[in-house]
Amino acid sequence: MRLILLGLPGAGKGTQAKVLAERLGLLHISTGDMFRQASAEGTELGRRAQEFMSAGKLVPDEVTIGMLLERISKPDASLGFMLDGFPRTIPQAEALDQVLEARDEAIDAVLYIQVPEADLMARLTGRWTCAQCGAIYHEQTSPPKQAGVCDLDGTALTQREDDRPDTVRARLDTNREWTEALAGYYRRAGKLHEVDGTGDPTSITTRLLDELAGVQSAREKA
Ligand code: AMP
Ligand code: ZN
């Protein structure tokens, strides 16, 4: 199977992509991971990508598309893959479709993990750190014993710029724009499957697998 996972930041897309790929025996391909690795290795591609990543921008299509198409052409991708973080633009989606079509292949399904805005905000703005000792807390998953104070040294906790509500809201807005555009693209192609992303990670995995089982049995009947 050739799958794409869509979801806003905080929806658990990366986690689910890893688990699903393993359960289904698919190659997990994350363009973000590929760029980070290239950057750590100091390659030309990595240097180009890092410029955009540091500025919080998308890496240009001509760089991203070439890298992804090369990756899915390797032998280990022939049995199927799970794309995580690609496509992020309509030209990326179109380039992918064209290459697959030329090989008589296609994307089987696009899973869109849906989480209400308020939940995403809570997940993404809940992180607090101690400037004194570096301890990290999360309001929901690992709160300090006393709100706003470090358990270890009693220092008042602070929030990183990235985790502040205004920053998070701006990030969600930008991401929503391209995610919705892609959802529309795949909806028109009859490939979009929206899955409830609330609750614990295990039940989300179960929902995703159930949805895929439906896709597979429909494909076998066809
Ligand atoms: P991610 O880990 O998916 O959030 O990706 C980290 C960064 O890599 C993004 O903020 C972008 O700068 C870049 N990136 C990853 N995937 C893409 C893509 N499909 N198109 C453009 N830029 C990307
Ligand atoms: Zn501390």
Image: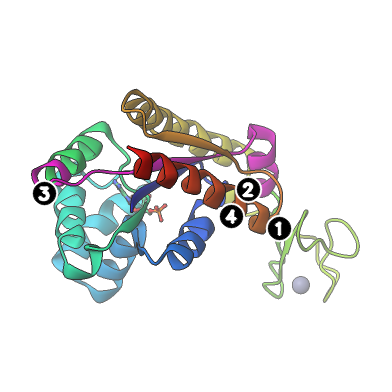
Q: Nearer the viewer, mark 2 or mark 4?
A: 4
Asked if residue 150 is positioned above or below residue 1 in the image, the reply reads: below
Residue of label 4: 205
Label 2, label 1: how far apart the Cα atoms are: 11 Å
In this rendering, does residue 10 appear at all?
no
What amino acid is labelled 3 in the image? Arg
Is ligand 2 closer than 8 angstroms to the Cβ of mark 1?
Answer: no
Q: Magenta segment, which residues?
A: 100-125
Residue 216 visible in the displayed image: yes
Q: Which of marks 3 and 1 is in front?
A: 3
Comparing 68 with 171, the one in front is: 68
Secondary structure under the numbered disc 2 in the rendered image: helix
Within 10 Å of disc 4 (Cα), the crowding (few <14, some 14-19, many 20+) is: some
Which label sits on residue 105?
A: none
On the image, the x and y values in percent for residue 145 come to 90, 65
Quarter of image, res 80: bottom left
Mark 3 → mark 4, Cα distance in angstroms: 30 Å
The amino acid beneath tag 4 is: Thr
Residue 128 image offset from top left, x and y in percent? 71, 58
Nearer the camera: disc 4 or disc 1: 4
Q: Does dot 3 land on a helix, a strand or a loop?
A: loop
> Which of the labelled discs sits on residue 124, or is there none?
2
* Residue type, label 1: Trp
Q: Quadrant of the C terminus?
A: top left
Most distant residue in the left direction: 102
N-terminal of the pair, mark 2 or mark 4, is 2
What residue would you read off at disc 3?
Answer: 103
Q: Earlier in the sequence, mark 3 or mark 2?
A: 3
Whole-angstrom CA distance, mark 2 to mark 4, is: 21 Å
